[in-house]
Amino acid sequence: MAEALVGEDTFRKVFGLSKKAERDFATDLVAALGRLDRALLPPPATHPLASLIAEGPRAVDRLLALVERGSAREAADAADALAHVLTAQSAPKTTQERLRGALKSRAGDADLEALLAKTLALTGDEGFLAEQLRRLSDDDPGVVATAARLLGFGRATFAVPALMGLVSPERFYESRWIIWALGEIGDARALPALEIALAHAFRVVDCLIAIGKIGRLTSLPHVTPHLLAGHAEQKDAAVRALAMILDKNREGARVMGALRDQLAGIIERDLADPQAPISTSVRFHMLLCLARLGVHIDIARVRKYLGLGPAGPADARASPFARATPGGTRTGSR
């Protein structure tokens, strides 16, 4: 068995895996997937300021001091660490003020400026985000793209109408970040613009991922055709989008009736075909879709569908894809 990547407490509280057989299965599955597809599950990297990140809000003052007075490398590491810490909480005005001051005093170092701007956007600084909204009207596509990216980091819902108006083939370069920002903001008002772009085959992969992040069941008719007819990259994006939509609508997904059965059938047909030209990443997300549709698959078929070889001695009940839940459908080996 592979070495566990996380402790038992994390397995229990975060993943809901309380039995040893479940934890062993999860550990082996993660290790096997990492060997098959390093892009899907890359090995964990250690942040140089990991100990301060672990302290959370208590470390903000020390990280800000490094941003303000540390070397360029120390300031960059501290800005990145602050982004980790401040993403999960609201930042006080004093923190935002110090970040704005650092952004001015550190002007000239483009990489550090970009990190500080991202961190400031993540804090939700209203003045800073309002300035990015104004920059969406700039003639320079690079300025527009950067502003859209920062509005996305800031989850700036007030910018949705302006961003929607910029989703256009005439804005091909900056549209990538505009669409990404709409997905990050997650406001359903953006769906018409994204779905129209998708229907016109404009930035298909970007639109699919953004639609998935917004996560409305009403988007399924726009996503599912790309499970069938899209090229490899589009199919990957479509199955990821479907997995995200189903994740946000687990109960609704299980009462979709005929549509649920059709989706599950399409996905299982691809998974059951060993010659299907689909990557490990696509197969993994297809299994997530089946689980979120309430389809339960035994451990042998999980391994078969992922191309992991025969099952080990672990009890089949260890598989998170094979649990019985109310309203779910269990499928046996075939």
Image (tube, helix red, strand yellow):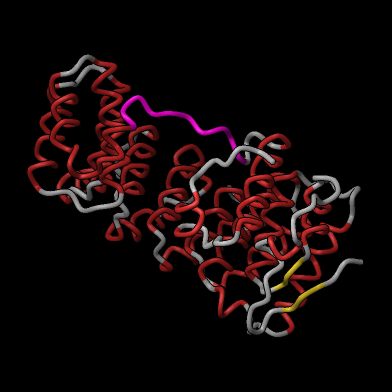
Q: Residue at x 62, y 62 (%)?
A: 242
Quarter in which the N terminus is drawn: top right
**Quarter occupied by the C terminus:** bottom right
Q: Relative to residue 289, is residue 156 drawn left or right? A: left
Residue 59 on image: x %, y %: 19, 37
* The one of 137 and 307 positioned closer to us in this rendering: 307
Viewer-proximal residue among 259 and 159: 259
167, above or below 253, in the image = above
Q: Is residue 246 above or below residue 48?
A: below
Q: Is residue 203 left or right of residue 100?
A: right
Question: At which x and y percent is residue 206?
Answer: 55, 48
Residue occupying the point 13% across, 35% down: 61
In which image quadrant can residue 72 be found?
top left
Q: Which residues are magenta?
A: 41-50
Image point (38%, 29%), residue name: 47
x, y percentage for residue 97? 9, 39
- Where residue 287 sits, quadrant-wise, is bottom right
How many dots with numbers? 0
Q: Main secondary structure of the magenta part?
A: loop
* Residue closer to the observer: 265 or 159: 265
x and y percentages locating residue 46 in the rendered image: 43, 28
Residue 204 left/right relative to 177: right
The magenta stretch spans residue 47: yes
Q: Relative to residue 305, is residue 128 drawn left or right? A: left
152 magenta-colored: no
